[in-house]
């Protein structure tokens, strides 16, 4: 539902990266997306393509990698990335960590032209 | 050439939410993010909570809606300061909205901040507001299958409130099944059943609230 605003934030970040790495040209962005992120990969890709059309970033590819969600222990804060709710914390043994609070779209790497 | 970014979080909201969380913790404020469908009883629960807080806990509320200040008016009448956040076209509150409010007079010297989100089971779940806990509110008329249909919220919630239990029996809602469905998607979730209309079960909610407040108090003392 918020793919377009996420795509806009991504565009802003990509523009900054383009400036940092100039004169090399940004080719692709590798993102991690977990199934609990409430983001539809196709809608995100569509939004990014629409926003970058006819700009210097047109054609920059989004490489979306699916990762398991992150769970967080409510007592000690240990984090664990596994597909299903873990029954206990791997750090302190407390029962039933919850899904981590923050959104789960993370940038893993970018690909730029040149050496 | 590949440039690694070590899982840099893109979301500006997450960064603002961390600031809000630090700010609230430093002031010893427990913030609760109340999320449920329109009409699930969020405002009624805030009103009941306001009455319980009287003479016990200094509290205030932020309430989000697309339009009107009906909810803030209702909550103020129930006895605690309330700030209405009108979101216009937005279907959820975000951390910036909370940050814009935390310095206001109404929120000075409080211990409990009740944040009533925009009525919606989907989008608010994805936006961290810097709260200490998320509370999912599911009312009897909505049906007991909602935790299975909207797992994003229930997986993130610390507590599920089954509201309007005075209406049990008027439809096929089975409170036991609702709990089982919630635990299927979120084994950690705590559950209370209550009716704001009759007052039945409210002690379960206030006990949970007292627990949340007690967890924060020692933390504040340690930091002081």
Image (cartoon, coloured by chain):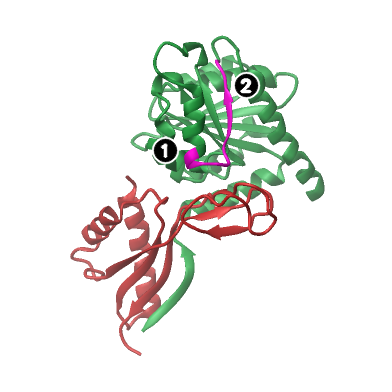
Question: Residue B124, percent across and down?
Answer: 44, 39
Mark 1 highlights which residue? B92
Which residue sits furthest bottom? A115
Q: Where is residue A47? Give x, y as percent.
A: 26, 55
Which x, y percent locates residue B120? Answer: 40, 32
Q: Colour of chain A?
A: red
Return the chain for callout 1. Answer: B
Residue of label 2: B49
- Within-10-Å neighbours for mark 2: few <14, some 14–19, many 20+: many
Across and down, in percent, residue B154 comes to 48, 38
Q: Colour of chain B?
A: green
Q: In terms of secondary structure, where does tag 2 sit?
A: helix
Q: Residue at x 61, y 17 (%)?
A: B201
Up the image or down, B71 lies above or below B98; here it is: above
Residue A84 in the magenta stretch? The answer is: no
Give the residues drawn in magenta, as a range.
Answer: B184-195
Q: How many marks?
A: 2
Q: Residue at x 67, y 59 (%)?
A: A91
């Amino acid at each position: 539902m918020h793919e377009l605003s996420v795509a806009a934030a991504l565009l802003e970040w990509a523009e900054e990266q383009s400036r940092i790495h100039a004169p090399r040209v940004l080719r692709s962005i590798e993102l991690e997306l977990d199934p609990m992120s409430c983001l539809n990969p196709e809608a995100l890709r569509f939004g990014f393509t629409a926003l970058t059309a006819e700009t210097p970033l047109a054609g920059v590819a989004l490489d979306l990698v699916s990762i398991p969600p992150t769970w967080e222990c409510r007592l000690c804060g240990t984090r664990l990335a596994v597909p299903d709710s873990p029954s206990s914390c791997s750090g302190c043994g407390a029962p039933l960590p919850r899904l981590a609070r923050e959104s789960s779209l993370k940038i893993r790497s970018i690909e730029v032209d040149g050496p | 050439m590949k440039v690694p970014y070590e899982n840099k979080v893109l979301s500006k909201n997450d960064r603002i939410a961390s600031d809000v969380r630090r700010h609230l913790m430093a002031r010893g404020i427990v913030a609760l993010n109340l999320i449920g469908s329109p009409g699930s009883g969020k405002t009624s629960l805030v009103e009941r909570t306001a009455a319980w807080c009287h003479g016990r806990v200094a509290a205030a509320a932020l309430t989000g809606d697309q339009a009107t200040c009906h909810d803030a008016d209702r909550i103020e009448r129930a006895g605690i300061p309330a700030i209405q956040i009108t979101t216009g076209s937005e279907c959820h509150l975000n951390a910036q909205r909370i940050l814009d409010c935390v310095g206001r007079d109404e929120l000075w010297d409080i211990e409990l901040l009740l944040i009533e989100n925009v009525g919606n089971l989907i989008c608010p779940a994805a936006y961290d507001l810097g709260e200490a806990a998320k509370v999912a509110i599911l009312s009897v008329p909505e049906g007991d299958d909602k935790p299975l249909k909207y797992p994003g919220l229930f997986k993130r919630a610390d507590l599920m409130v089954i509201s309007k239990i005075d209406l049990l029996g008027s439809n096929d809602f089975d409170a036991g099944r609702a709990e089982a469905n919630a635990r299927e998607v979120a084994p950690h979730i705590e559950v209370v059943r209550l009716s704001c209309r009759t007052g039945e079960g409210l002690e379960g909610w206030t006990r949970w609230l007292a627990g949340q407040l007690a967890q924060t108090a020692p933390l504040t003392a340690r930091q002081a």
